[in-house]
Image (cartoon, coloured by chain):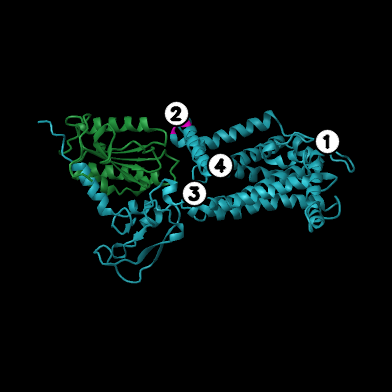
């Protein structure tokens, strides 16, 4: 893994860093990620592929925010269609709880998000991520 | 070939979901609740079945008349009968959808084989109960189905005659035949609940009920169908009559439709062969994770020194793969020092999904090939990566 991520020309100036988790069974990941795990066309968004959205610890999302990311998200399969039956419901609950915890800590809870997109919904997923990035842009992620 | 067609079927199934999700909210997609819908229809079948049972008379002379009495003279009897009939169709459709969906979306093998096997038994027993339900009316259609069945059973080698005798309760149709049919209808229906226990035993929080919108919709649809198109009987069965053919619900009486073109014995053999090959479906594809296109991250491992016995992983594991056992000795971390319980992973049930890792706030569970510290490093790298150099 290169220590200095390669920068593509599309890199948006001043775009906030975002860390996301993507379920292996949700959006098809072929051709979705660059070699350094950033999203194609969005080099400021790092995506970590996980075996199920339920694998993600809420603590990891907090860690991302603490480490300087402006936002963190998890993308699982459509609600009701989790390969492991429960993962995305559980994750949605955990994110709800995390948001309450964040707002008690005076951190904008909108900086964490949960998405649910299936195998064929790459465009919708990318749109949702782009919207999320726009939303967290002003939320004071340290850079 | 088989693998490729399964993959394209999976793609098509999920494409269909995408379309449905455009019309309906995701969590109301009926295809996500095929099992729950089947259970709803089964419940309706039991309730309406009990009401019909109150009026049914299992005798050669009385059966047809008692069903007619229920339909004509009992208030709303025709509705109960219609609901029983159409709910049976809906039930069969729902479990077939359930079967194909879980097959095509890769939810039938490895740790989930016991659900597949119990499902096959459920399918067979349900189909059999549906078929014996047709016999109970004892009209010409019942007679035709019974005689085809007897022919099929007789053609079984060695035990054929005995099977036919067991089915009819004697060498031919006699006074004990209809009580026997009644038991062959109600008995399997009760067996379904034993099999459902097996179907659910490895699942935590099985989705056994659809969203209430679908409950109401299905109920309403059944009431409308039962009233608009009442279930009817054919002409009463006559000893010695040889009825020709009837419209039947082909999707679960198809062996009898086939019996029109082949000997009933062969139709029976075909059913047996289909069920037998269905039983081995979870074991046919022996693939490595690479061939399946998934990352094998290893089964979850409990980090004993950190486990506090809090049971969170135990509640979240969708496959009941985590058991809490009395802790043999205290853990090392401060939180774990006074634990009473210890989590244990049952390897044969673990599917490597990692949901328990997300549940654990004490770093007491790991997937061996995707460790917590590595994920943390990647998060920090992603979060801190330097901004594009513009100057």
Q: Position of residue B3 (x, y in %)?
A: 51, 44
Disc 2 to disc 4: CB gap under 8 Å = no
Name which residue lies at 64% across and 54% down.
Answer: B191
Q: For marks 3 and 4, give the CA distance.
A: 18 Å
Establish whether labels 1 and 4 are both on one chain. yes
Please tell me which of labels 1 and 4 falls first in the chain: 4
- Picture layout, residue A134 above or below residue B271: above
Residue at label 1? B244
Please tell me which of labels 1 and 3 falls first in the chain: 3
Q: Which residues are magenta?
A: B20-25
Secondary structure found at label 1: loop
Q: Quadrant of residue B47?
A: top right
Q: Is residue B228 found left or right of A42 in the rendered image?
A: right
Magenta segment, principal secondary structure? helix
Disc 1 to disc 4: CB gap under 8 Å = no
Q: Chain of mark 2?
A: B
Q: Quadrant of residue B322?
A: bottom left
Crowd band around label 1 with a 10 angstrom C-alpha radius: few (<14), some (14–19), many (20+): few
Q: Position of residue B219 (x, y in %)?
A: 59, 35
Check the rendered structure and report the hue given to chain B: cyan
Q: Which chain is painted in green?
A: A
Q: Nearer the viewer, mark 2 or mark 4?
A: 4
Residue at label 2? B22
Q: Which mark is residue B206?
A: 3
Looking at the rendering, in which quadrant would you find the C terminus of chain B? top left
Please tell me which of labels 3 and 2 falls first in the chain: 2
Disc 3 to disc 2: CB gap under 8 Å = no
Establish whether labels 3 and 4 are both on one chain. yes
Q: For marks 3 and 2, give the CA distance.
A: 26 Å
Q: Which mark is residue B100?
A: 4
């Amino acid at each position: 893994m290169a220590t200095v991520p390669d920068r593509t020309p599309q890199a948006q100036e001043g775009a906030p860093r975002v860390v996301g988790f993507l379920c292996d069974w949700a959006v098809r990941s072929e051709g979705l990620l660059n070699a350094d795990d950033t999203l194609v066309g969005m080099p400021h968004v790092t995506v970590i592929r996980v075996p199920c959205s339920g694998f993600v610890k809420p603590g990891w999302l907090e860690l991302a925010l603490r480490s300087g990311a402006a936002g963190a998200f998890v993308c699982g399969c459509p609600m009701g269609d989790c390969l492991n039956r429960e993962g995305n419901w559980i994750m949605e609950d955990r994110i709800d709880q995390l948001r309450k915890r964040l707002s008690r800590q005076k951190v904008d809870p909108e900086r964490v998000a949960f998405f649910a997109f299936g195998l064929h919904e790459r465009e919708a997923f990318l749109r949702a991520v782009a919207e999320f990035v726009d939303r967290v842009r002003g939320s004071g992620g340290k850079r | 070939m088989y693998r490729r067609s399964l993959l394209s079927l999976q793609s098509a199934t999920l494409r269909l979901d995408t379309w449905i999700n455009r019309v309906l909210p995701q969590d109301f997609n009926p295809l996500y609740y095929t099992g729950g819908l089947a259970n709803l229809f089964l419940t309706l079948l039991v309730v309406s079945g009990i009401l019909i049972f109150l009026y049914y008379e299992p005798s050669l002379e009385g059966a047809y008349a008692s069903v007619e009495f229920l339909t004509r003279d009992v208030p709303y009897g025709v509705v109960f009968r219609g609901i029983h009939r159409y709910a049976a169709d809906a039930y069969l459709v729902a479990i077939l959808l359930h079967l194909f969906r879980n097959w095509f979306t890769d939810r039938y093998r490895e740790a989930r084989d016991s659900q597949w096997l119990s499902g096959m038994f459920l399918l067979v027993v349900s189909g059999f109960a549906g078929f014996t339900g047709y016999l109970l009316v004892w009209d010409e259609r019942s007679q035709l189905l019974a005689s085809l069945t007897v022919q099929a059973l007789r053609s079984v080698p060695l035990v054929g005659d005995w099977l036919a005798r067991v089915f009819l309760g004697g060498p031919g149709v006699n006074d004990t035949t209809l009580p026997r049919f009644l038991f062959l209808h109600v008995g399997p229906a009760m067996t379904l609940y034993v099999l459902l226990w097996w179907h659910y035993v490895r699942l935590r929080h099985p989705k056994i009920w659809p969203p209430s919108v679908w409950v109401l919709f299905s109920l309403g649809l059944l009431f409308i169908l039962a009233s608009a198109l009442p279930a009817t009987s054919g002409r009463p069965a006559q000893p010695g009559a040889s009825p020709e053919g009837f419209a039947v619900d082909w999707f679960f009486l198809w062996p009898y439709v086939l019996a029109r073109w082949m000997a009933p014995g062969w139709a029976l053999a075909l059913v047996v062969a289909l069920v037998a090959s269905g039983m081995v479906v979870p074991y046919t594809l022996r693939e490595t994770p690479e061939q399946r296109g998934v990352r094998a991250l290893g089964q979850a491992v409990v980090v004993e020194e950190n486990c506090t016995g809090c049971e969170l992983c135990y509640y979240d594991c969708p496959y009941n793969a985590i058991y809490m056992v009395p802790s043999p000795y205290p853990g090392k971390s401060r939180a774990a020092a006074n634990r009473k319980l210890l989590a244990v992973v049952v390897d044969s049930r673990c599917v490597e999904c990692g949901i328990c890792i997300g549940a654990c706030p004490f770093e007491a569970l790991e997937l061996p090939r995707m460790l917590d510290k590595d994920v943390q490093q990647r998060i920090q790298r992603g979060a801190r990566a330097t901004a594009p150099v513009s100057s």
